[in-house]
Amino acid sequence: MNLPNLLTVLRIGLVPVYAIVFFSDSPYNMQGALLILILAGLTDILDGTLARKYKWVTDLGSMLDPLADKLMMLTVMLCFVLAGRVSWLAAGLLIVRDTGMILVSVIFVSRGKKTVPATYWGKANTLLYYLALAALMFEWPNAAELLWGVILLAFVTSLTYIRGLLELNAKQ
């Protein structure tokens, strides 16, 4: 297992830590949760940069990287819904989308097919998602509207991912 994959596994390990900190009784729980999200985001950027720069891209990493992103996003959304900061509709749309993306990747990999590495659109969506989460955490104006923009972009990004997946595997 190479360094980018280890960073991705670390990001997966941050998922339950985020939930614990989010629901802690500390007056700084939102700041702590945000720091965990920032750490997750930085490891995401670092693992992708290292994998591309040093040609350490692997099939495992191509599957684990988006899985780590989706697990964190799903956990964050669930925490926000349980805390009453996000509607079930908004969370449900993101959860359905992210769960679908995970299942599609797992199905393709389990059948020996290739998955599409993370794209710039996907990375942009993740960055905007983190920004929307910070806005929701600290109750910034227009945070809900920003989240709905992220939801729309997430579905557009999913369509481009599926198109790329089909094109990549049509060549096999």
Image (cartoon, rainbow, N blue to C red):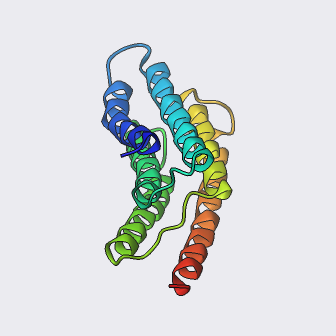
Q: Is residue 72 toward the left or the right of residue 160 in the image? A: left
Q: Number of callouts in the render?
A: 0
The percent position of residue 166, horizontal first and vertical second, equals 54, 81
Residue drawn 59% across and 56% down?
Answer: 151
The percent position of residue 74, horizontal first and vertical second, equals 41, 49
Residue at the far top: name it.
Answer: 27
Q: Is residue 14 toward the left or the right of residue 55 in the image? A: left
Say if 20 sits above or below 9 in the image. above
The percent position of residue 143, horizontal first and vertical second, equals 63, 39
Residue drawn 54% across and 75% down?
Answer: 165
Say if 12 sits above or below 91 in the image. above
* Residue 88 appears in view: no
In the foreground, 68 or 34: 68
Residue drawn 49% across and 29% down?
Answer: 39
Quarter of the image for residue 104 reads bottom left
* Residue 50 appears in view: yes
Residue drawn 43% across and 58% down?
Answer: 95
Say if 28 sits above or below 120 in the image. above
The percent position of residue 150, horizontal first and vertical second, equals 63, 52
Quarter of the image for residue 117 reads bottom right
